[in-house]
Structure formats: C-alpha cells, structure tokens
Image (spheres, rainbow, N blue to C red):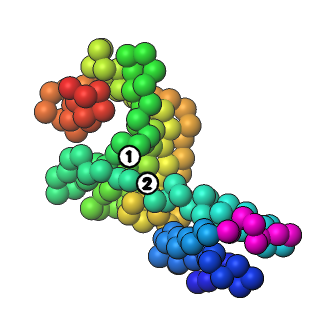
Amino acid sequence: MQLLDASDCPNAQLVISLSGIDMLKRWKSFNQCLHGESRVRIVLAMLVALAAAPALAAWEKMVGNGNITIYIDPMTIKINGGNRSVLALAAYNELLPNGARSMRGMMEYDCKGGRFRTLSFSHYAEPLAEGKLLSENDVPSEWSSVAPKTFAAEALAHVCGK
C-alpha cells in the first residue's frame, strides 16, 4: 500500500506495506522539496508507523514446552536499583479458559531477592498478542519467590544477567 509518494521530490519516497513497516527512504534533498500539505502527509505517515511499532517488538524466545512458549523483548529491559522490568509474551498452544491464546505483560524481577511479580498484563485471542483484546489488568501482583528449574528462574537469570 503506497501511503505517500512525493512526486515533486523524485529522490524521496516512503512506503508502508500491510505486512509490517517496510520503509524505503531516499533522502537526497528531501526536507528542502517537501512543503505544506506534503509535510503534513509525511508526519501523518510517520505517526502511523510509530503506532504500529509495539506490534513489531523484538521478541526473543526464552523457554518453552509443549504447552507454552515464553518470549521477552530485550530492548524493554529497565533497571531500577536491584530490580529489572521487561516486556514478556506468553504464547499458549491451547486456549485458556477465557479464550486467550497469548498474554503480554510487564514483569518485574528482584535480582538480589530472587522474586518476581507481574506489573500489568493483557490477554489476546490470537498468538503473539494479536487479535481481540480479551482482558487486561494494571494492578501489580504480589511478589512471588522464584523456584529453581522453572520458567521464572530462567527469566530471572536472563533478565538479571546471571
């Protein structure tokens, strides 16, 4: 889908495809030849691209078994003292009771204390946090201890760099 073709600027073109954000940029003298309505259109096109960006998280597979696969987005790891938070995604092979096939949530790990909690989460009808939003919760859970040889233990080790 062609969103913007600045025909008055032969060296500039921005293309956004339906399968993701594929931007082809040729910038020679771009800013100089765009003006008025063309500038508004390019700003709108860039806003559309930014709005789609969360769907394109750099998911890194951490662990999985026959029932669930856990991914994290390492670009979202934030350090706050001895704690680390990260955006995580759980993909389920079977439907949950609420009809969800995936869950995306912000997790927090207490690296020194060996604990974790969920800060927020959302359930989705399709894998990889796509499809209809089924439920969401922004109330942090209580801290839980990390048991050895669990998904939480692997996530703690990965996020905390152990």
Q: Give the quadrant of residue 144.
A: top left
Marks 2 and 1, how far apart at CA = 6 Å
Q: Give the quadrant of residue 49.
A: bottom right
- Residue 34 falls left or right of residue 63: right
Q: Earlier in the sequence, mark 2 or mark 1?
A: 2
* Residue bearing mark 1: 73
- Residue 26 falls left or right of residue 58: right
Q: Is residue 23 above or below residue 110?
A: below
Q: Position of residue 31 (x, y in %)?
A: 72, 64
Label 2 neighbour load within 10 Å: few <14, some 14-19, many 20+ = some
- Residue 93 falls left or right of residue 143: left
* Residue bearing mark 2: 57
Magenta part of the chain: 29-36
Q: Are marks 2 and 1 in contact (CB under 8 Å)?
A: yes
Q: Which mark is residue 32?
A: none
- The residue at 21%/47% (across/down) is 63
Residue 5 colored magenta? no
